[in-house]
């Protein structure tokens, strides 16, 4: 592992990476802490700002554009900005369940999907963590996507169990 790729990266990449790390670390505290108190609200504001910085700064990064300077990861940035807007609106309106679901979806589908694809060979994270074996980035991507899709599958089964009245998702297959 070497921090040289990060230290020599463009300032926009450094800002992006710092904000993403902050969002990644704060996410579980903000999204899964049982108490919804002042700490939740304060850390939530910080998390929302960090996510907005991540999304906005991504538009200054054009390492592997497919359509001009833009790549599919920029669609995730638009998804993140929209989700932040919708999630904050739900909180203001007092719709706690929708707020919670929106922000958790953003964390898992926004932060993690984008984070996994940052291990593409040639990207800064790949060069930092896999300097000698950059092709291992593909393994990280496949494993990360498997975890994400497994989480989505579990969520769908849980929601289906709740709608059908099953006491446990396993009852769906019986």
Image (cartoon, grey):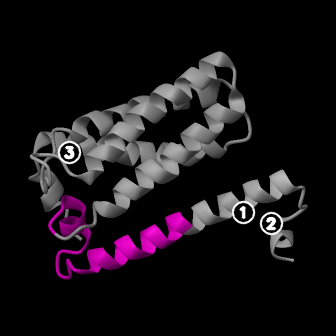
Question: Which residue is situated farthest in the top direction here?
Answer: 93
For the residues bearing labels 1 and 2, Cβ distance under 8 angstroms: yes
Q: Position of residue 163 (x, y in %)?
A: 82, 51
> Compared with residue 86, is residue 9 higher up or lower down, i.e. above or below?
below
Q: Position of residue 146 (x, y in %)?
A: 49, 72
Tell me what residue is drawn at x 71 percent, y 34 percent. 97
Residue 166 occupies quadrant: bottom right
Image quadrant in which the C terminus is located: bottom right
Query: Given this view, does label 2 or label 3 mark the residue nearer the observer?
Result: 2
Report, in whole angstroms, how far the alpha carbon at label 1 lies from the one at label 2: 6 Å
Q: Earlier in the sequence, mark 2 or mark 3?
A: 3
Q: Which residue is mark 1?
A: 157
Q: Which residue is mark 2?
A: 169
Q: Is residue 88 magenta?
A: no
Q: Secondary structure at mark 3?
A: helix
For the residues bearing labels 2 and 3, Cβ distance under 8 angstroms: no
Tell me what residue is drawn at x 24 percent, y 62 percent. 125
Tell me what residue is drawn at x 17 percent, y 55 percent. 6
> Compared with residue 89, is residue 68 higher up or lower down, i.e. above or below?
below
Q: Secondary structure at mark 1?
A: helix
Query: How many numbered marks, from 0 up?
Result: 3
Image quadrant in which the N terminus is located: bottom left
Q: Position of residue 96 (x, y in %)?
A: 70, 29
Question: In this orientation, does residue 38 appear?
Answer: yes
Q: Is residue 139 left or right of residue 169?
A: left
Task: Give the magenta-colored segment's residue range.
Answer: 122-149
Q: Which residue is mark 3?
A: 14
Q: Secondary structure at mark 2?
A: helix
Tell me what residue is drawn at x 13 percent, y 57 percent. 64
Q: Is residue 88 left or right of residue 19?
A: right
Residue 98 occupies quadrant: top right
């Amino acid at each position: 592992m070497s921090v040289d790729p990060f230290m020599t990266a463009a300032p926009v990449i450094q800002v992006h990476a710092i904000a993403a790390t902050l969002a990644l670390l704060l996410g579980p505290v903000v999204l899964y802490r049982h108490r919804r108190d002042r700490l939740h609200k304060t850390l939530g504001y910080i998390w929302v700002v960090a996510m907005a910085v991540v999304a906005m700064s991504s538009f200054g990064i054009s390492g592997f554009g497919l359509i001009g300077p833009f790549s599919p990861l920029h669609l995730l940035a638009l998804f993140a900005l929209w989700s932040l807007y919708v999630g904050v609106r739900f909180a203001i309106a007092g719709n706690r369940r929708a707020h919670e679901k929106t922000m958790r979806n953003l964390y898992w589908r926004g932060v993690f999907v984008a984070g996994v694809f940052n291990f593409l060979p040639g990207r800064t994270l790949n060069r930092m963590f896999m300097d000698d074996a950059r092709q291992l980035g593909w393994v990280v991507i496949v494993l990360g996507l498997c975890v994400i899709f497994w989480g989505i599958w579990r969520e769908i089964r849980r929601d289906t169990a709740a709608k059908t009245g099953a006491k446990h998702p396993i009852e769906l297959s019986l």
